[in-house]
Image (cartoon, rainbow, N blue to C red):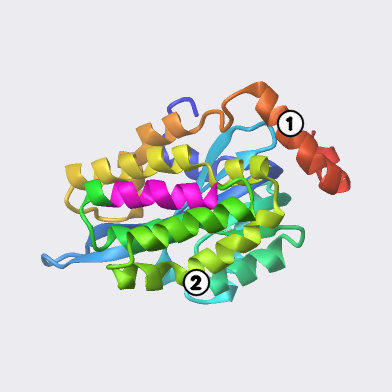
Amino acid sequence: MNNQNLTELSNRKLDPCYFCLYCFPFKIFINEGDNNVNTQDIYIFMACNVLGVRKYITTVYLKDYLKTSLWYDLFQSFKEKGLETILYALLPDNKSLKDALRLSFKDLEFILSCYDSINKIQKYFPLKYTSLISEQIKRIYLAQDLTEFSLKKDEFIENYKENKFILDLLEKDFKICSQSFSYPYLLRKHIYSFYFSRELYKKLTVISHKKPHFTSIDDFITYLLPSIQLFESRMYTSKKEWISLINLIYTSKKDLLIPYL
């Protein structure tokens, strides 16, 4: 990223093709003046290009995008910056967001964000306890196949049977998660990319603790800039693994992928 400032980061070109678009939900405190500090939901968009390099895209207030048309305008601005194709997207359960992406990128395939499940739990438990549950949820989402998924899910249900509200919170997510097993493990591994999300959320938590509130999203991103530079690195653990993933995608998306290789 070469130590770009906020303006340069906001105006830079996007890659023409992204392997996956990631949308991370988070909460920050915004000082709206007159000692009026309110919690605001934000979406942080990052992506991984076909070379396996992560890129920061943008951050928005969720309250500013309550309609499909507003999301559509945002994604059209992505196109104006050079983005043509997205292969996969890991998204929160947000219908307007998904509808706008479908309209903007017709070849895109959606997978429900595993972070939705983790975030639901984080509201109620201390970090140490939440980390344990998060790791168990990770094992469920990254099971090798449906058989292993069912075993790990049943084990989770047994462990938390005394906390029925946890199971009810996650019941719908687990049903949707089961549908993702139509995708090969290697593909799911890089789409979910838990180690990447763990890095990001740790940095976001540290920043939110260092500064009790922000004046705007730009103020928040200014504090996030050094971390963004660190995040813009390789997604994969080895070059061989990434080549295997591209080969896997190529078998089903050759015509879509080949212009960008």
Say if residue 50 shows up in the picture.
yes
Q: Name the kind of residue labelled 1 in the image.
A: Ser
| Quarter of the figure that contains the C terminus | top right
The magenta segment: 130-142
Q: Is the magenta stretch mostly helix, strand or loop?
A: helix
In this image, 185 relative to 28: left or right? right
Tell which residue pokes out farthest to the top in this image.
239
Quadrant of residue 123 in the image? Answer: bottom left
Q: Name the kind of residue labelled 2 in the image.
A: Lys
Quadrant of residue 43 in the image? Answer: bottom left
Query: Along the line of sight, which residue is nearer the eye, 174 or 17?
Result: 174
For the residues labelled 1 and 2, the Cα–Cα distance comes to: 32 Å
Q: Secondary structure under badge 2? A: helix
x and y, in percent, of residue 103 in the image: 70, 68
Give the residue at x 58% y 74%: 68
Badge 1 or badge 2: first in the primary sequence:
2
x and y, in percent, of residue 204 in the image: 32, 45
x and y, in percent, of residue 16 in the image: 71, 43
Question: Label 2 belongs to which residue?
Answer: 172
Dot 1 and dot 2 residues touching (CB under 8 Å):
no
Give the residue at x 50% y 63%: 92
Question: Label 1 belongs to which residue?
Answer: 244
Q: Does the magenta stretch include residue 49?
A: no
Numbered disc in front, either 1 or 2: 2
In this image, 245 relative to 201: left or right? right
Tell which residue pokes out farthest to the bottom in this image.
67
Tell which residue pokes out farthest to the right in this image.
255
Q: Secondary structure under badge 1? A: helix
**Residue 53 vertical placement versus 213 (above, below):** above
Q: Does the magenta stretch include residue 139?
A: yes
